[in-house]
Amino acid sequence: MYSQTRNLKIISEINVVPYIDVMLVLLIIFMVSSSSLFFKGVDVDLPNMAAESASALLKEKDVNFLVIEINQKGQLGLSVNNKKLQQDFSIESIILRVKKELLIQPSSIVVIGGDVLTPYSKIIILLEALRYAGISKVGLLTDIKE
């Protein structure tokens, strides 16, 4: 009589599907957690003034205003107490002039006034340059709608 022998083989292969699942989950966790590292922001001190206190500040005689103006082409100008000094400044010369004015009168208020059509990136570049120069308190000039 012929006896039947079963050929039982042990499968010695590695099942990689669970490892792939674990690696994909780890990859997704890494991507979500590291996404905040790629976004860069600008530190801005937002004003907490009401409109009444802002207009009172504008009426004070001893307050010195440094207004950096940006037109739609990205050209820079500087006004000190509503006296235009010069147009077509470079960012470096604007920063030097603002630092000089702040040494003369440290209580000066620095504001940026942009044209409606000024690219947002130009204002951000100017804010970053002022921040790197140590000028951290900068306001944004706007029109008041009545």
Image (tube, grey):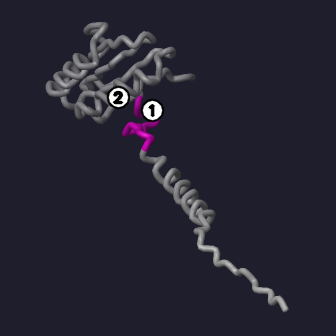
Q: Label 2 vs label 1: CA separation?
A: 26 Å
Q: Which mark is residue 127?
A: 2
Q: Is residue 100 inside the magenta stretch?
A: no
Residue type of the residue flagged with mark 1: Glu
Identity of the residue furthest to the bottom in this view? 1
Decide if residue 34 is on the left or right side of residue 94.
right
Q: Residue at x 25, y 9 (%)?
A: 85
Q: Which residues are magenta?
A: 38-54
Residue 102 higher or lower than 6, as above or below: above
Comes first in the chain, label 2 or label 1: 1
Residue 88 higher or lower than 116, as above or below: above
In the rendered view of the protein, which quadrant contains the N terminus? bottom right
Decide if residue 29 is on the left or right side of residue 85.
right
Nearer the observer, 73 or 14:
14
Q: Residues within 10 Å of mark 2 (few under 14, many from 20)?
A: many
Q: Residue at x 19, y 25 (%)?
A: 99
Nearer the observer, 16 or 121:
16
Counting from the top left corner in percent of width and height, residue 5 is at: 76, 86
Residue 21 higher or lower than 75, as above or below: below
The image quadrant that residue 68 belongs to is top left
Q: Is residue 53 inside the magenta stretch?
A: yes
Q: Residues within 10 Å of mark 1 (few under 14, many from 20)?
A: few
Which residue position is annotated with label 1? Answer: 52
Decide if residue 92 is on the left or right side of residue 127.
left
